[in-house]
Image: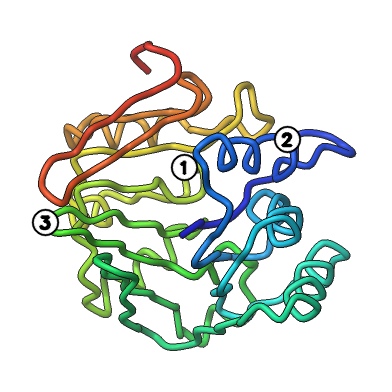
Amino acid sequence: MLVDGGGVYGEGFDIGRSVVAPFLWHEGIGKIDVVVLTHAHTDHLGGLPFLLENFRVREVWSNGESADTVLYRRFLEIIQRKGIKHRIIKDREKEMQLGSIGIRLFNAEEPDFSGKNLNEKSLMMRVTLGKVSLLLPGDIESDNESYLLKNGFDLRSQILFVPHHGSRKSSSAPFLNAVKPQIALISCGADNTFGFPHQELLERYEAAGIKIFRTDLQGAITISTDGRNIRTESYKKVNP
């Protein structure tokens, strides 16, 4: 399973072609069972068209929230042309199974979210192997976090992919208390123009005793598990 495909950097740069595909080929991967699109912003969708064209993809999962962009239209065109099954998940909560991996998908159904940008409409998922869970909340912020808490979703996970790249508007204290992660992974570019991750967010994680990994400081980060133990590796051996 591949969740999102990254993107941006500069005009003409294709992260799917230049980064994601070479890594997958190096690992001997030519087939992807499921590609998940959390939402259609360029920094999540950008690398997927190249991957859909150049890998054997069985299914694509999304919640159908569209974007009026050339990139999103190309994404849909490739899916249709190649006959890839596109599973659109609109359910408030849906359980799936992929081999030994349990997957629970979440969507926000609050009427107030109808005018929100795509971040708050992200398709969220909790992936579980054995006793270890990983929460992937996309780019949600405090409104959607409050929705999840108010509606009693089970968010407990040992590993948290930090919402919205470390924005101060995400990772509220109640949300962190509900997830109770041991490890947090922040995906953000070095010296990015948004200032992610924000210092006040880092302080919330540190106050909760959560170990933080950051791609802007440590490069590529690998987290692996056998369903009991968790192993972490980073390209750069530095302490964030």
In this view of the protein, which residue sits in the foreground, 203 or 77? 77
Q: What residue type is labelled 3?
A: Lys
Rounded to the nearest angstrom, the CA distance separating label 1 from label 2 is 30 Å
Q: Give residue 63's position: percent from left, percent from top.
A: 56, 79
Q: Mark 1 points at which residue?
A: 168
Q: Mark 3 points at which residue?
A: 131
| Marks 3,2: beta carbons within 8 A | no
Task: Using the image, determine if residue 207 lies above or below residue 67.
Answer: above
The residue at the point 79 percent across, 71 percent down is 78
Rounded to the nearest angstrom, the CA distance separating label 3 from label 2 is 35 Å
Quadrant of the image occupied by residue 114: bottom right
Q: Which of marks 1 and 2 is nearer the N terminus?
A: 2
Quadrant of the image occupied by residue 91: bottom left
Q: What residue type is labelled 1?
A: Arg
Bin the neighbour count of mark 1 within 10 Å (Cα to Cα): few under 14, some 14-19, many 20 and up: many
Q: Name the residue under label 2.
A: 18
Q: Give residue 18's position: percent from left, percent from top.
A: 73, 35
Task: Using the image, determine if residue 41 lies above or below residue 165.
Answer: below
Which residue ends up furthest to the top in the rendered image?
238
Q: Secondary structure beneath disc 2?
A: helix
Q: Secondary structure beneath disc 1?
A: loop
Could you say which disc has been placed on residue 63 in the image? none
Q: What residue type is labelled 2?
A: Ser
The residue at the point 13 percent across, 40 percent down is 229
Q: Which of marks 3 and 2 is nearer the N terminus?
A: 2
